Image (cartoon, rainbow, N blue to C red):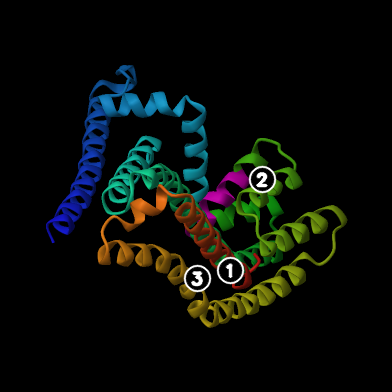
Amino acid sequence: MMILAILIGALLSVVLLMAAIREFLAVGAARRRAVSGAEGFGGDDRPATVLQDADQQLRHTRLGRWLEDELDLAGIDRSPLLVVVSGSAVALVATYVLWTFFAPLLAVFGLLAGVAAVRWYLRRGQLRRREAFVAQLPELARVLANASYAGLSLPTAIGIAGDELSEPAHTELTRVATRLKFGAPLSSALAGLQARVGTRETSVLISTLVVASRSGGSMVKALRTIADTLEQRKETRREVQTTLAQSVATAYMIAGVGVVSLLLINAFKPGTVQQMTTTPIGQAALIVSAVLFVIGFVAIRRMTRIIA
């Protein structure tokens, strides 16, 4: 019971630390905005706090640039430094848990847990943003069709759609409209959108726009047909996700069964897991069981995955 209380206290401390860092950064940013507003454009643009300075230094590294790009794709307004600190905190807690409850040899997987947590956070945000954009595609196609029917050019219609639609379509279409204003070809500007979103629905809409802009034709009729098709596809996708929800939950339960089993074994006979990690037979058993659990998890996720 005491160990559980210590673990809960450690987790709460990490959460409070993250909240304090976020609040500290917010206060520093507000103070810098106030100073810039008072001094005009001649004020000092250097970071007002040590944390902001560290964040700027991190953004100049390869890791910082990668994190910044991934956060931008996920639509997450967080600093790369906060993500790194959060991942480090998860790694420390996981290392402590594995060292205390299982075996010192397994503590190395705590470091991998921090990296996995960061990647899961980024991929989850990107998947949500991608799904939100796909859900807006029928409305986007209708806006473009109405603008084209009114006699507006396609770049102008894309700019109007970016102003009318909410996030994430607002940001993505505004980027496309900005590139078109600076003279980028339509195919190049839309290719950037496809690279950021990367779904079949988006590819179909982009291909229709590019072909219609090059060869002409009834763009209004094509866009309205695509809007109806995307609406039906969205409803079908929602029904499939609801049907496969139980199977997806089963995949995560399989991953949890392995950890819970080790906890129960170590609870019934303390030191069992540590003894397994120090003997060849125990190490082989752990490796084989881990591989089987991973194969089961990946197989279920592959079978229940909806291809975008």
Q: How far separated are the C-alphas under marks 3 and 1?
A: 34 Å
Q: Look at the image and tell me whether residue 34 can be seen.
A: yes
Which residue is the extreme one toward the left?
A: 2
Residue 146's x, y, as percent?
65, 67
In front: label 3 or label 2: 3
Q: Is residue 176 magenta?
A: yes
Res. 291 image quadrant: bottom right
Q: Amino acid at mark 2?
A: Gly
Give the camera-side residue of 45 and 299. Answer: 299
**Of helix, strand and loop, which one carries label 1?**
helix
Which residue has dot 1 on it? 139
Of the two numbered discs 1 and 2 on the same chain, state the one appearing first in sequence: 1
Residue lying furthest right: 215
Give the residue number, with chain letter if any, for mark 3: 251
Q: Is residue 55 above or below residue 208?
A: above
Q: Residues within 10 Å of mark 1 (few under 14, many from 20)?
A: some
Front-most of 254 and 16? Answer: 254
Which range of residues does the magenta coloring cover? Answer: 163-177
**Which dot, 3 or 1, sits closer to the camera?**
3
Q: CA distance from mark 1 to mark 2?
A: 20 Å
The residue identified by callout 2 is 192
In the displayed structure, would residue 277 be above or below residue 178?
below
Q: Main secondary structure of the magenta part?
A: helix
- Please say if the residues under marks 3 and 2 sit with CB atoms less than 8 Å apart: no
Q: Amino acid at mark 3?
A: Ala
Q: Earlier in the sequence, mark 3 or mark 1?
A: 1
| Quarter of the rendering containing residue 25 | top left
In the drawing, does residue 123 fall left or right of residue 15? right
